[in-house]
Amino acid sequence: MKIHKITCLIFLFVVATHTPAQVITLDSVLNAIEQNHPMLKMYEAQIRAIDDYSQMSKSWMPPTISVGPWQARYDNVKDGMWMTTVEQMIPNPIKQKASYNFMRSMSFIEAKEKKSKRNEMFAMAKQNYFEWVILKKKFAVLAQTDSLLTYIVKVAQSRYPYSKEKLNNIYKAQADLYELHNMETMLTGEMRMKNIELNSLMNFDESRVFDIDTVIQIPYYEIQSPDTSAILASRSDIQFFDASINLIRLQQKFEKTKSLPDISISFSHMNDLNNMANRYSLMGMISFPFVPWASKEYKSNIRSLNSKINALRYMRQALLVETTGMIASLQTSIQSTRAQLQNYKENIIPTYYKSYQSSLLAYEQNTEDLFVVLDGLKMLRMAMMNELDQLNTLLKLQVDYEKQMEIR
């Protein structure tokens, strides 16, 4: 009966492994990635660079000064004049504003790219975090089985001198125990790999050791019905197309301002070298870029940009259709996987546990062979591990859904 009592205690209560390492939640991991990852900092630096670069559109062209003789004769320089000329281009404020808006909008493109990259990193972090959770739960199952199997081996060895147990069954139990040790070693190594991968994503020292919170909540995404507006509001890659279309429209506005005239002012002062009266000249100049032979360039650019906008609209529409189908597929998979997981919890594992209990009771009453008990214990362990594999699949689907909808 001792074995039976120990079995009940082990399989009714999940004993978490104790570790002195710091426990980091998933939300803390995501915060660390957002604050520390150099890729995201690169996007922030590029956004600041674009903002600074856009200020150049408000500048003026530098004035030019020219000095030299004017209308001087080759044989007598004094018959000419010494002229000093200052010229200044006056920028068109409409052109400046259009140029500024066009350059400034480039930062929105970088912001959407940053958000998309952050979403990918968050998905990688969630996947590694959840896989670590599953590994810890699997290790707990192995530790429970290890403890029980060790006790069974000792009991079997104590029965052997009295011819109440077969030697081959004892060896079989010991072999199963050694296999468990190998599996525990493998899981320990995989958990360490997850620790390193998360450290890398958080830009921490790879040797930094921490623990994770194994309490997880699985939202019921399969019962939600995200419409097109919700997808458009959440997906940064779709918003990237919107920002790109807006950028091209602003570029079109800038191209249209090229039809506006430019103005420049030129002032010349002339000193007579023959003691005659000084003279000056004040000239205003205006360009006419709207004439047919000068307007071909910007008109062609405007037509070309219209085609680019249409192309981006089709790409945006295709991505939206693909995303909608992907989300519907993920919801179906989540629903199916959750049902299978529920079946493991309510039917499969309890049935295997009853089978193991009955074989254990029969073994205690010397009416069943140890081999049957070991097989029942192994089948129960495999069922529990399969349940965790199913949970891992459900968590992967959750990560994929949150990646598609860009849910943190």
Image (cartoon, grey):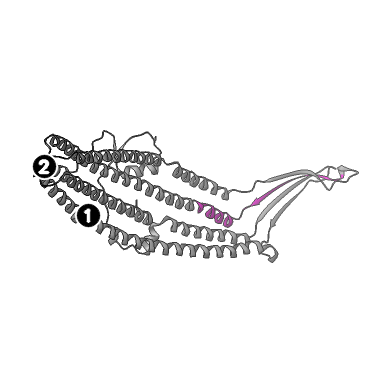
Location of mark 2 (residue):
5
Q: Is residue 242 above or below residue 205?
A: below
If the image is split into quadrants, where does the N terminus sit?
Answer: top left
Where residue 255 appears, as percent x and y from the top left, is: 59, 60
What residue type is disc 2 on?
A: Lys
Instruction: Looking at the image, tell me whether mark 1 or mark 2 is earlier in sequence order.
Output: 2
User: Label 2: how many residues lie within 10 Å, few (<14), some (14-19) or many (20+)?
Assistant: few
Q: Which mark is residue 344?
A: 1
Where residue 236 appears, as percent x and y from the top left, is: 42, 55
Q: Residue furthest right?
A: 75
User: Label 1: how many residues lie within 10 Å, few (<14), some (14-19) or many (20+)?
Assistant: some
* Mark closer to the observer (1, 2): 2
Displayed quadrant of residue 219: bottom left
Q: Mark 2 and mark 1 in contact (Cβ < 8 Å)?
A: no
Q: Residue furthest front?
A: 163
Q: Is residue 261 left or right of residue 183?
A: right
Q: Is residue 167 left or right of residue 107?
A: left
Q: Nearer the viewer, residue 166 or 16?
A: 166
Where residue 390 appears, as percent x and y from the top left, is: 28, 53
Residue 104 on the magenta span: yes
What residue type is disc 1 on?
A: Tyr
What's drawn in magenta, residue-wise?
79-106
Where residue 18 appears, as percent x and y from the top left, is: 23, 36
Q: Residue at x 27, y 51 (%)?
A: 386
Q: Nearer the viewer, residue 57 or 142?
A: 142
Q: Residue at x 10, y 43 (%)?
A: 364
Q: Secondary structure at mark 2?
A: helix
